[in-house]
Amino acid sequence: MTLRFIRMVPTRPGSRRPSGRPPHIDKLTHQRGIESEMRVLESCRLPSRPPWMHRARLATRIEDRSGVDIVIESDVGALLVQVKSSKAGKQHFRRRPLLSIAIVVVRAADSAEALLVKVVGELEPIRAQHLEKGLAVRPRRRRSPPAKA
């Protein structure tokens, strides 16, 4: 008895769209990107950061798929950062019309302070837009216990 394998063909050949993923990158490039992200993250946690920058964290997997590498929690809510290792990478980054994402180019010679200056410089215009729209996050008021009767 011989086994025959049948190649399955999609029922709707025109329905398959190419995914929005970038072309495969080599391991070294990927590792450099991760190192750049970690350097920017560390710089956003420096004590010299502006008072409006509360916390910084790496993006979740879903946020990362939307083109976000780092999320900075601020007085106007979440500010989004994409980290690139070259100006060419910045030029090729696909803008998301509904998301205001700051793009920061990281060089090997950049110090942590220099990276913080770059991040703040890219985020300030986005933060200003949020402030103009009145999107500043108000501090939470503590609930007072119910009055006793």
Image: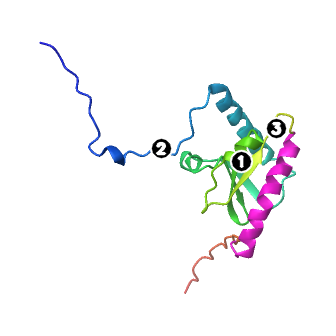
Q: Where 100 falls versus 15 (above or below)? A: below
Identify the amino acid type marked 2. Ser
Residue tagged by mark 3? 107
By secondary structure, the bulk of the magenta-drawn segment is best described as helix
**Is 50 on the left-hand or right-hand side of 74?**
right
Q: Residue 13 in the image: x percent, y percent?
A: 32, 43
Identify the amino acid type marked 1. Gln
Q: Counting other residues with Cα less than 10 Å from the Cα at mark 2, is it few (<14), some (14-19), or many (20 or more)?
A: few
Q: Residue at x 83, y 56 (%)?
A: 121
Of helix, strand and loop, which one carries label 1? helix
Q: Which residue is drawn at 86% across and 51% down?
A: 117
Q: Which residue is drawn at 26% across and 33% down?
A: 8
Identify the amino acid type marked 3. Arg
Marks 3 and 2, how far apart in space? 30 Å
- Report if residue 146 lies within the magenta region: no
Q: Quadrant of residue 132?
A: bottom right
Q: Which mark is residue 110?
A: none
Q: Which of marks 3 and 1 is in front?
A: 1
Residue tagged by mark 1? 91
Q: Which mark is residue 19?
A: 2
Residue closer to the observer: 97 or 64:
97
Residue that sits furthest to the left in the current view: 1
Disc with the residue nearer the chain's start (1 vs 2): 2
Which stretch is magenta? 111-135
Residues under numbered marks 1 and 2 in contact, where contact means CB atoms less than 8 Å apart = no
Marks 1 and 2, how far apart in space? 21 Å
Q: Where 61 falls versus 80 (above or below)? A: above
Of helix, strand and loop, which one carries label 2? loop
Q: Which residue is drawn at 35% across and 48% down?
A: 15
Q: Quadrant of residue 140?
A: bottom right
Q: Residue 120 in the image: x percent, y percent?
A: 81, 55
